[in-house]
Image (cartoon, grey):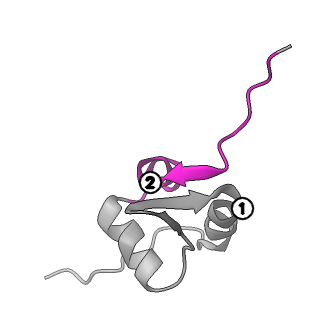
């Protein structure tokens, strides 16, 4: 019997789809140390466990991180 397993390393596009964050916001979270990544050559990947931790650490509700001009 074939079994389908969840990938253990995710591309940022997948992380964005699961979190609702865009590419720039994800890189800001990486730079701030809030999202751990694995670099494989030039590729940036996120472990499933680190993604789960990041999602669980996200605050509930809507937060505007940029002030209106």
Q: Earlier in the sequence, mark 1 or mark 2?
A: 2
Q: Tell me the quadrant of the picture where the N terminus can be found.
A: top right
Magenta span? 2-21
Q: Residue furthest front?
A: 41
In the image, what residue occupies the spot 60% across and 69% down?
60
In the image, what residue occupies the spot 65% across and 74% down?
57
Q: Relative to the observer, which residue lies in front, 44 or 54?
A: 44
Q: CA distance from mark 1 to mark 2?
A: 15 Å
Tag of residue 16: 2
- Say left or right for 42 vs 2: left
Q: Quadrant of residue 24?
A: bottom left
Q: Relative to the observer, which residue lies in front, 14 or 42?
A: 42
Q: Residue furthest left?
A: 69
Does the segment drawn in magenta span residue 12? yes
Q: Find disc 1 in the rendering and name its residue.
A: 49
- Say left or right for 30 vs 64: right
């Amino acid at each position: 019997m074939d079994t389908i397993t969840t990938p253990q390393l995710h591309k940022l596009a997948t992380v964005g789809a699961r979190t609702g964050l865009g590419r720039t916001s994800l890189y800001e979270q990486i730079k701030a140390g809030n999202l751990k990544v694995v670099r494989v050559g030039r590729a940036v990947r996120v472990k499933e466990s680190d993604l789960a931790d990041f999602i669980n650490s996200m605050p509930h509700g809507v937060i505007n991180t940029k002030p209106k001009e």
